[in-house]
């Protein structure tokens, strides 16, 4: 009986040692979520001045941030990625033109956004327009087709090289 008990204890000890060596005793710690934020302006004239100074294009994101599923997906899958942040830093001045349903906005910002929506003939969200510093349109994308960041950035890069 003692031999059997020693055998059971030995098996349990070996199993425990194997689990320790395999890392099974450690609680899995999820990798921290790193949210990448690019600097988005809301002032188009300021963006134009910065674009002229830095010789960059301006990316206009016409969005309905609190209701538009495509807008939310684009933000999560493209705008929030390190790849986009790196591309934007080198090439773009970013402008978010938001048309929320429930989020409060200053009246002045609403009017400025509506004027740009009319100027650029935006009919739905998301609409992404890239312009040069003078305001000439060089790229337009209406809607979001769930393209991964690398493919979306490739479209933007292609439009920049053709201007």
Image (cartoon, rainbow, N blue to C red):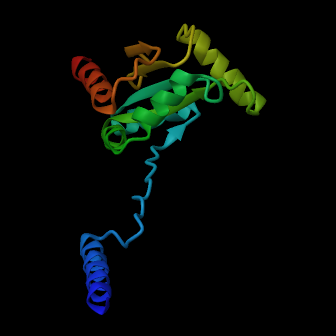
Q: Residue furthest bottom?
A: 2
Above or below residue 94? Residue 163 is above
| In the foreground, 93 or 34 | 34
Above or below residue 57? Residue 85 is below
The quarter of the rendered structure image containing the C terminus is top left
Total number of numbered labels? 0
Residue 151 % position (x, y): 28, 26
Residue at x-position 54% and y-position 37%: 41
Residue at x-position 61% and y-position 24%: 64
Task: Please give left or right for residue 162 compared with residue 139 in the image.
Answer: left
Residue 119 % position (x, y): 57, 11
Residue 105 % position (x, y): 74, 33
Residue 103 % position (x, y): 73, 33
Question: Is residue 44 visible in this depiction of the protein?
Answer: no
- Looking at the rendering, which quadrant does residue 68 occupy? top right
Question: Is residue 153 visible in this depiction of the protein?
Answer: yes
Task: Please give left or right for residue 7 compared with residue 112 in the image.
Answer: left
- Looking at the rendering, which quadrant does residue 51 occupy? top left
Task: Please give left or right for residue 86 compared with residue 133 in the image.
Answer: left
Residue at x-position 40% and y-position 64%: 28
Above or below residue 2? Residue 121 is above
The quarter of the rendered structure image containing the N terminus is bottom left
| In the foreground, 93 or 25 | 25
């Amino acid at each position: 009986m003692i031999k059997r008990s020693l055998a059971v204890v030995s098996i349990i000890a070996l199993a425990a040692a194997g689990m320790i060596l395999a890392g099974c005793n450690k609680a899995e710690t999820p990798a921290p979520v790193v949210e990448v934020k690019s600097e988005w302006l809301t002032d188009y004239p300021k963006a134009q001045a910065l674009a002229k100074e830095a010789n960059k294009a301006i990316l206009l994101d016409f969005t309905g941030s609190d209701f538009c599923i495509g807008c939310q997906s684009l933000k999560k899958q493209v705008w929030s990625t390190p790849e986009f942040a790196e591309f934007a830093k080198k090439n773009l001045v970013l402008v978010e033109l938001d048309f929320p349903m429930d989020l409060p906005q200053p009246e002045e910002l609403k009017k400025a956004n509506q004027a740009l929506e009319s100027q650029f003939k935006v009919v739905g969200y998301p609409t992404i327009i890239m312009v040069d510093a003078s305001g000439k349109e060089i790229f337009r994308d209406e809607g979001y087709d769930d393209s991964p960041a690398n493919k979306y950035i490739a479209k933007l890069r292609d439009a920049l090289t053709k201007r």
